[in-house]
Amino acid sequence: MEENLHALIGRIHAAPPRIVYAFAGAGSLALWWLHGVAGSSRTLLEAIDCYAPRSLEALLGTPPTQAVSAEVAREMAVRAYARAALLTDRGGPLLGVGCTAALATDRERRGADRCCLAIFGPDGARGYALTMSKGRVREQQEELVSRLIISALAVACGLRDDVWLSLRSDEDLFCW
């Protein structure tokens, strides 16, 4: 892990928010990075990998019309926030993180390679929609999504003013 990423995650672990992190389609590397830096038990309450469509449906309570959307990411974050409230007994700030993505795959798929991320807290939700280059292989897309998650968590923890990513000219990040 890069030294600056390791240091940023250490600062996230030192920040007060505790999180439940729900993800579908991508974001497992972000979880690995969070666990790879000492102190993750101060940050993570639970992680939910909704890889199967029925798993995502169970989290949301209904099947989504479009799995990779701002609405689904926001609802995942809201549900994760509710889980965080159930799992902690020591109070303090809580965050629900929801990420849903469609990455490069071994089959024909319509649409762009993309990710929607939302972080929900007591002040509401902040979200990100990332469109990725078809020129990136799956591993590169997973890394980019995971960097977005870590950077957005740093923003939500008050450690940064904005998300920072190295995007290609054919990639776009929209914040909402």
Image: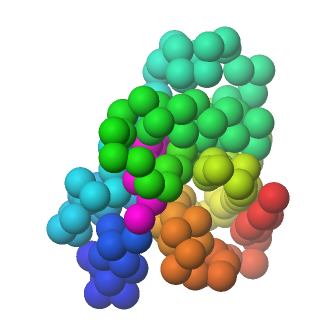
In the figure, residue 173 lies in which quadrant? bottom right
Residue ID at (62%, 13%): 61
Is there any visible trace of residue 8 in the rendered image? Answer: yes
Q: Is 163 on the left-hand or right-hand side of 171?
A: left
Q: Is 87 on the left-hand or right-hand side of 136?
A: left
Of residues 176 and 120, the one nearer the viewer is 120
Vertical side of 158 occupied by 72: above or below: above
Residue found at the far bottom of this picture: 4
Q: Position of residue 47 (x, y in %)?
A: 37, 39
In the figure, residue 69 lies in which quadrant? top right
Residue ID at (22%, 65%): 39
Residue found at the far left of this picture: 38
Q: Is 144 on the left-hand or right-hand side of 135?
A: left
Of residues 51 and 79, the one nearer the viewer is 79
Query: Does the magenta portion include 143?
Result: no
Vertical side of 138 occupied by 5: above or below: below
Of residues 55 and 82, the one nearer the viewer is 82
The way the protein has been coloured in the rendering is rainbow
Query: Does the magenta portion include 19?
Result: yes
Locate the C terminus and report the quarter of the image it occupies.
bottom right
Q: Which region shows up in magenta?
A: 16-24
Residue ID at (52%, 69%): 157
Q: Position of residue 37 (x, y in %)?
A: 22, 68
Is there any visible trace of residue 26 in the rendered image? Answer: no
Q: Position of residue 11 (x, y in %)?
A: 37, 78
Locate the N terminus and report the quarter of the image it occupies.
bottom left
Vertical side of 9 occupied by 63: above or below: above
Vertical side of 48 occupied by 37: above or below: below
Residue found at the far front of this picture: 90
The chief SS type of the magenta part is strand
